[in-house]
């Protein structure tokens, strides 16, 4: 197996090293982004759901940018949410408008969960890297 081509956003490498995972890995022209949550700089959850979702998307945006990518390059999304019934549609509709604008949208799978380590929302994504953004392992 070749060495993983890991992408780190600025300023958070210690947090990823502490929890022993890579924020994103480039492979064969794609970027596979680990689940991003609405954590503060110290890794603790933002208690307000709307702010937590915004932080999760900010974290995702930083990783995409570190790989030379944007939300326009995202092709597949998985969303995990604690107790999604009363709030998913409101939260998701707002997010889609802010980050993906108009159709076509990426594929989305939404999963209701009972536990996210103190968080209420998590998003993971796969992006097709633009030409020239494939990195060393591309």
Image (cartoon, rainbow, N blue to C red):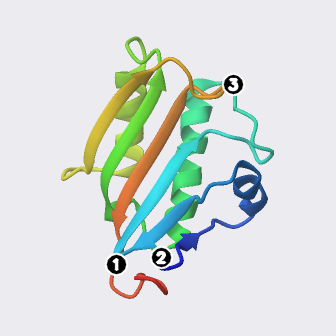
Which residue appears at 54% of the width and 36% of the height?
Answer: 53
- Quarter of the image with the C terminus in it: bottom left
Q: Give the residue drawn at x 57%, y 51%.
A: 58
Residue beneath the point at 33% across and 31% down: 110
Percent of width and height locating residue 103: 19, 50
Q: CA distance from mark 1 to mark 2?
A: 7 Å
Q: Is residue 44 left or right of residue 129?
A: right
Q: Position of residue 1 (x, y in %)?
A: 46, 76
Front-lying residue, 86 or 26: 26
Q: Is residue 70 above or below residue 42?
A: below
Give the labeled residue for mark 2: 68
| Residue highlighted by disc 3 | 47
How many neighbours does mark 1 have within 10 angstroms: few (below 14), some (14-19), or many (20 or more)? Answer: some
Above or below: residue 55 compared with residue 46: below
- CB atoms at circles 2 and 3 under 8 Å apart? no
**Residue located 44% across and 31% down the image:** 80
Question: Who comes first in sequence, dot 3 or dot 1?
Answer: 3
Q: Are marks 3 and 1 in contact (CB under 8 Å)?
A: no
């Amino acid at each position: 197996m070749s060495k993983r081509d890991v992408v780190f956003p600025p300023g958070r490498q210690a947090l990823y090293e502490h929890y022993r995972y890579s924020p994103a890995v480039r492979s064969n022209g794609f970027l596979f982004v680990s689940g991003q949550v609405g954590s503060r700089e110290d890794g603790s959850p933002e208690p307000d759901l709307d702010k937590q979702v915004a932080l999760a998307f900010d974290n995702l945006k930083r990783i995409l940018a570190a790989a030379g990518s944007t939300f326009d390059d995202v092709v597949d999304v998985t969303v995990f949410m604690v107790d999604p019934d009363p709030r998913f549609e409101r939260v998701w509709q707002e997010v889609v408008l802010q980050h993906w604008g108009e159709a076509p949208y990426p594929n989305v799978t939404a999963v209701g969960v009972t536990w996210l380590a103190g968080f209420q929302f998590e998003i993971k994504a796969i992006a097709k890297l633009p030409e020239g953004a494939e990195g060393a392992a591309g």
